[in-house]
Image (cartoon, grey):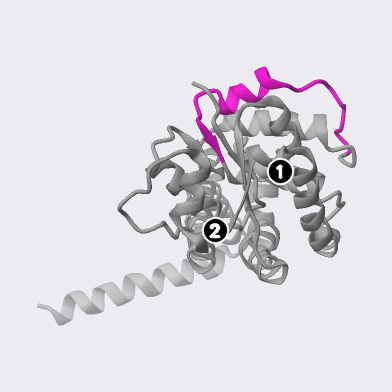
Amino acid sequence: MQMQVLSLGMTRTASASITQALSILGYKNVHHGIQAISNPNDWETFSRASDAFFPTLPTYNGKPFGRSDWDRVFGQCEGVTDMGSFFALPLIDAYPDAKVILVERDIESWYASMEEAIFSTTWGWRADLIINVFGRLMGLTGGLTIRKIMLGYYEARNVSEMRSKARDRYRRHYAEIRASVPAERLLNYDVKAGWEPLCAFLGKPVPDVPFPQANKRKEHVARVRAKQDMFLKAMGKRTFRRAMPWILASGAVAVGIWSYQNQERVAMLLADIEAWGRTLKSAWK
């Protein structure tokens, strides 16, 4: 399958809407970051790509990483959005025949969306517990990898530094792509313009359906929080079930020790229980 479209606007620039739009236009297997969540092989490839392309990472190795490597994730895709934006320039080189769509939004609006939907859900106590504790125990790598990608892309050591660098990285992202892609291969696109400019660029007829609006900020945050809560509850139940035999055994040992150390009090307690039983028995006669 031939890669035909690279939509390389940064995350939180209508990438989910573009994914749906391309699918409506007939492009097959348009890749969005949501797919990677359920595919460990994608995370492994993205992790290796980060080591190859992001020099500020402690794991950076600069090893060659080309078309055959990207095809492990995108080989069955005709379009790429969202996660691909972190690796925009390497993907432009790897798929030289693909058309490039660049969606840009007001930088302050973009930053506010990133802060609420990405930075605050990928870092924080919930994310730390899931990614650093339970994820490691279960061998899950997705959370660790997305953090690695973002730290490498933003050239940051932590999320605070990432926040401080985000706006400059945003500006550089668009400048680098515009400098790298010939004008005839590039569409600077505003989703508010609807189908016409997109279809004209791609050579597709305009569909008789409204242009999609997907993955609004509040919806994204609610979905992420719901998944995090579900994961934490599941892990809590799993941990409780595993710990229960130890809790019961420890309780039994504690009762045994207490009984041994308080034999006289135990004898008195048993005598009181026996007397109480006789009283109840006589009352019911």
Q: Is residue 185 magenta?
A: no
- Tell me: residue 258, above or below residue 52: below
| Relative to 78, 105 lies left or right | right
In the rendered image, residue 42, in percent from the top left (x then y), is placed at: 60, 31
**Residue identified by numbered label 1:** 86
Q: Residue at x 69, y 66 (%)?
A: 115
Range of residues picked out in magenta:
58-80
Could you say which is closer to the camera, residue 241 or residue 171?
171
In the rendered image, residue 59, in percent from the top left (x then y), is placed at: 85, 33
Q: Residue at x 54, y 66 (%)?
A: 217
| Relative to 87, 257 lies left or right | left
| Relative to 25, 233 lies left or right | right
Work out how far the residue at label 2 is from the one at label 1, CA to CA, in angstroms.
Answer: 59 Å
Q: Earlier in the sequence, mark 2 or mark 1?
A: 1
Give residue 255's mark. 2
Residue that protrudes farthest toward the top in the picture: 68
Q: Is residue 244 visible?
A: no
Q: Residue at x 73, y 21 (%)?
A: 66
- Tell me: residue 237, above or below residue 2: below
Give SS at disc 1: helix
